[in-house]
Image (tube, grey):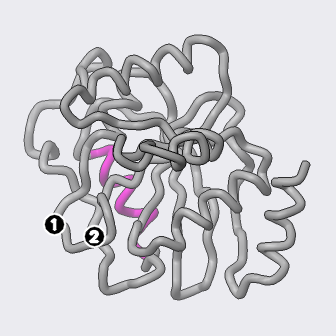
């Protein structure tokens, strides 16, 4: 209740407008893009709290050290040890199969910096778990943010990414100069099977 009230106050005072599809009713991978600012984290929380959507997100394990650990976990964080990324996939699979309904937010264009392609972790996790992909966005041009449509991945990476590119074509991000075109290095390779590991 408190989180919902905080989110209502945020959207009432913010110059940004929440324009969103309803929260997913089953476990889903939520793309957070374009990821160009620390404000994206604030938007993510405000969207989830407004929609009363249980939220999970992946973060470097160093963010969960010392006093920050309990806070980050309370906000939905799941620590990622990059030396053993498969453990994260198994944890997400277990959560999804347990009946827990949540949105797993992943920022495929990485941290806020210059990158040429998106990271494919969101795609592999969605295929491995069978979770749909919800297209979350930030668009400075219209000063709007929220959740877009939900799509089911087919395993045809090029075709799936074409649909994703179409949606994000007009989304500029908080800092448009840092926006990365939605493209995976794997698009020119074979399609992934649902059982492929992250």
- Outermost residue toward the front? 66
Q: Residue at x 74, y 49 (%)?
A: 22
Q: Residue at x 47, y 24 (%)?
A: 92
On-image quarter of the C terminus: top left
Label 1 sits on residue: 116
- Per the image, label 1 sits on a secondary structure element best described as loop
- Mark 1 near mark 2, Cβ–Cβ under 8 Å? yes
| In the displayed structure image, the side of residue 137 where residue 8 appears, left or right | right
- Looking at the picture, does residue 53 appear above or below residue 100? below
Which label number is shown at residue 180?
2
Task: Give the image location of residue 65, x and y in percent.
Answer: 42, 43
On the image, which quarter does residue 155 sit in?
A: top left
Task: Give the image location of residue 100, x and y in percent.
Answer: 66, 21
**Majority SS type along the magenta span:** helix
Q: Which residues are magenta?
A: 159-170
- Outermost residue toward the left? 189
Q: Residue at x 68, y 81 (%)?
A: 16
- 10 Å crowding of disc 1: few (<14), some (14-19), many (20+): some
- Per the image, label 2 sits on a secondary structure element best described as loop
| In the displayed structure image, the side of residue 111 where residue 191 appears, left or right | left
Q: CA distance from mark 1 to mark 2?
A: 6 Å
Instruction: Say if the magenta span includes residue 24.
Output: no
| In the displayed structure image, the side of residue 68 where residue 144 appears, left or right | right
- 10 Å crowding of disc 2: few (<14), some (14-19), many (20+): many
Instruction: Say if the magenta span includes residue 168.
Output: yes
| In the displayed structure image, the side of residue 99 where residue 92 appears, left or right | left
Task: Give the image location of residue 111, x and y in percent.
Answer: 31, 63
Which label number is shown at residue 130?
none
Q: Earlier in the sequence, mark 1 or mark 2?
A: 1
């Amino acid at each position: 209740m408190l989180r919902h009230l905080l989110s209502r106050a945020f959207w009432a005072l913010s110059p940004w407008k929440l324009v969103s599809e309803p929260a997913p009713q089953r476990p889903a991978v939520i793309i957070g893009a374009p990821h160009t600012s620390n404000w994206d984290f604030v938007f993510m929380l405000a969207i989830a709290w407004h929609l009363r959507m249980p939220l999970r997100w992946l973060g470097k394990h160093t963010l969960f050290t010392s006093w920050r650990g309990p806070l980050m976990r309370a906000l939905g964080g799941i620590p990622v040890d990059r030396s053993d990324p498969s453990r994260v996939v198994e944890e997400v699979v277990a959560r999804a199969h347990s009946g827990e309904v949540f949105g797993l937010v992943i920022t495929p264009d990485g941290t806020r910096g210059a990158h040429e392609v998106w990271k494919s972790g969101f795609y592999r996790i969605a295929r491995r778990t069978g979770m749909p992909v919800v297209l979350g966005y930030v668009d400075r041009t219209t000063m709007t943010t929220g959740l877009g449509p939900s799509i089911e991945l087919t395993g045809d990476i090029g075709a799936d990414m074409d649909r994703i590119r179409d949606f994000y074509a007009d989304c500029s991000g908080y800092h448009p100069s840092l926006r990365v075109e939605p493209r995976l290095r794997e698009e020119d390779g074979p399609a992934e099977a649902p059982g492929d590991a992250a």
